[in-house]
Image (spheres, rainbow, N blue to C red):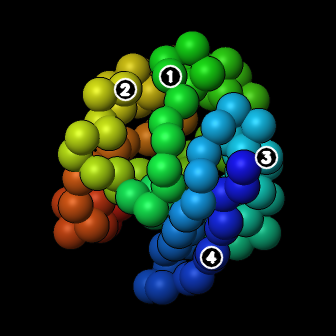
Amino acid sequence: MAIRIETAIEEQILRITLSGEGDEAAGNAITGDVIRAERESGLKKVLIDVRAVRGRLGPGWLYYNVKKYPPDLLGVRTAVIDLAENLRHAEFHEAAAANAGFELRYFAGEAEALAWLSG
């Protein structure tokens, strides 16, 4: 199974759009791709849109995945846009990221995510 990644830079925000079928192997691979894109851009605001990804990983995977976030990306503010029905683990992911020192928030809409990134 594979997840595709598209990146663009708009108004000093790195936009990452993910699509495809998600499972643990794809999640592990895409985490590396997202980290690489964040490093290459050098930007401090990231918008990740996962609404077109089919399948979600649970809180256990999210917890261990946060432990892989590199310390050089502390200070990067990340907004994740997902479908409302997929937000059940959002608070857990946000808390795990915050406990590791990362700013990450989930949103059901792009306008809210952009407002948070700008704030």
Given contact means CB atoms under 8 Å apart, are the residues at marks 1 and 3 in contact? Answer: no
Residue 25 appears at what percent x and percent y?
77, 37
CA–CA distance between discs 2 and 3?
20 Å
Residue drawn at the location 55% of the way across and 63% of the way down: 19
Q: Earlier in the sequence, mark 1 or mark 3?
A: 3
Tell me if mark 3 has few (under 14), some (14-19) or many (20+) residues whose alpha carbon lies within 10 angstroms of its own. Answer: few
Relative placement, left or right, of 39 versus 107 is right
Task: Name which residue type carries label 2.
Answer: His
Of 68 and 62, nearer the camera is 62
Which image quarter: residue 95? top left
Viewer-nearest residue: 98 or 86: 86
Question: Which element carries disc 4, helix, strand or loop?
Answer: strand
Evaluate whether residue 94 shows in this view: yes
- Count neighbours of disc 2 (C-alpha within 10 A) and say few if under 14, some if 14 to 19, many if 20 or more: some
In primary-sequence order, the first of circles 3 and 4 is: 4
**Residue occupied by mark 3:** 29
Tell which residue pokes out farthest to the top in this image. Answer: 60
First reached walking from the N terminus: tag 1 or tag 4: 4
Q: How far is mark 1 from mark 2, CA to CA?
A: 7 Å
Q: How many marks?
A: 4
Q: Which residue is mark 2?
A: 89
Contact check, label 4 and label 2, Cβ < 8 Å: no
Q: Which residue is mark 4?
A: 7
Task: Decide which of tag 4 and tag 2 comes sooner along the chain.
Answer: 4
Report the Cα–Cα distance between label 1 and label 4. Answer: 25 Å
Cα gap from disc 4 to disc 2, whole angstroms: 25 Å
Counting other residues with Cα less than 10 Å from the Cα at mark 1, is it few (<14), some (14-19), or many (20 or more)? few
Q: Amino acid at mark 1?
A: Gly
Mark 1 vs mark 3, CA separation in Å: 16 Å
Quote the CA–CA distance across marks 3 and 4. 16 Å
Query: Badge 1 is on which residue?
Result: 58
